[in-house]
Amino acid sequence: MFEVGTEVLLILIAAGFVAGFVDSIAGGGGLIALPAMLLSGVPPLTALATNKVQGFFGAATAAYTYARGGHVDLRKQIVPATISFFASILGALLVAQLPTDLIRIVLPVLLAGVALFFALQRGLNDDDKERRMSPMIFSASMVPLIAAYDGLLGPGTGSFFMLAFVSLAGYGILKATAHTKLLNCASNAGALLAFAIVATPWWMTGLAMGVAQIFGARLGASLAQKIGARLIKPLLVFTTLAMAAKLLWDLL
């Protein structure tokens, strides 16, 4: 029934739970789930596709939990979410045409910059700040750009959404996290659709990890809503730096 043995499946389920918890707060769940699958012997392309399967459940759960808490209005975000979905598909389809090797070289530097922004910027809390970009322009520019990147490569998508929401949309940390999870869920769904066409996810293993993601994401999103920026900000800095370090290690 499952594509892996019982012991490996239990390890992957545990990895899914932890990934869902971390990702619902600060993103970077793929840092946990993807290496766990690769170390378990899942082929790289299959691991990437399966990661989208299980990651979708965590992002959807986190988005729903934040919406129930009143931090994001799902109805008002239908258009940005739809844009994120289709842009992610487009990014995945353009993977052979765009200079992904160059992007991989620049990516660790960009992620380190994002981490430094959140670590050093003063006054970042759960209060909204001055908006530098209208919602319409934000949805037409930043959303498709970041979502297309998610379909193209993926690592750091949540960090880039967070940076855009905080620095351009003027959102507080908690509100930015809530909206990030919604758009990340949509881009995950688009990337999953594209991956399902060009690769073969391990559906049963991915679904089992997805169930664990649901419980981890519910716990993480609930804690984030209670503690807010005091929890989200340091974890965001840590996971973003960890992603930058891993990508740099892979390059070297």
Image (cartoon, helix red, strand yellow):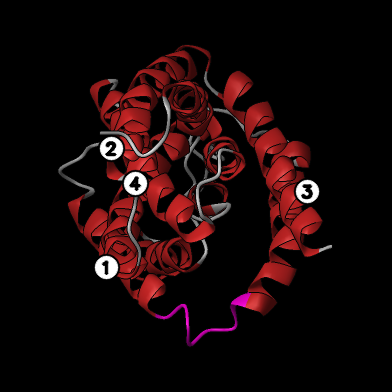
Percent coordinates x, y for residue 173 in the rendering = 53, 33
Q: Which mark is residue 12?
A: none
Q: CA distance from mark 1 to mark 3?
A: 31 Å
- Mark with earlier residue (3, 2): 2
Marks 3 and 4, how far apart at CA: 28 Å
| Secondary structure of residue under mark 3 | helix
Circles 3 and 2, Cβ within 8 Å, touching? The answer is: no
Within the image, what quadrant is residue 251 found in? bottom right
Q: Which residue is mark 4?
A: 202
Chief secondary structure of the magenta portion? loop
Q: Nearer the viewer, mark 3 or mark 4?
A: 4
Instruction: Where is residue 84? Give x, y as percent.
Output: 32, 60
Farthest residue in the right direction?
A: 252
How far is disc 1 from disc 4 in space, using C-alphas?
13 Å
Figure check: 107 above or below 218: below
Per the model, the C-alpha gap separating discs 3 and 2 is: 31 Å
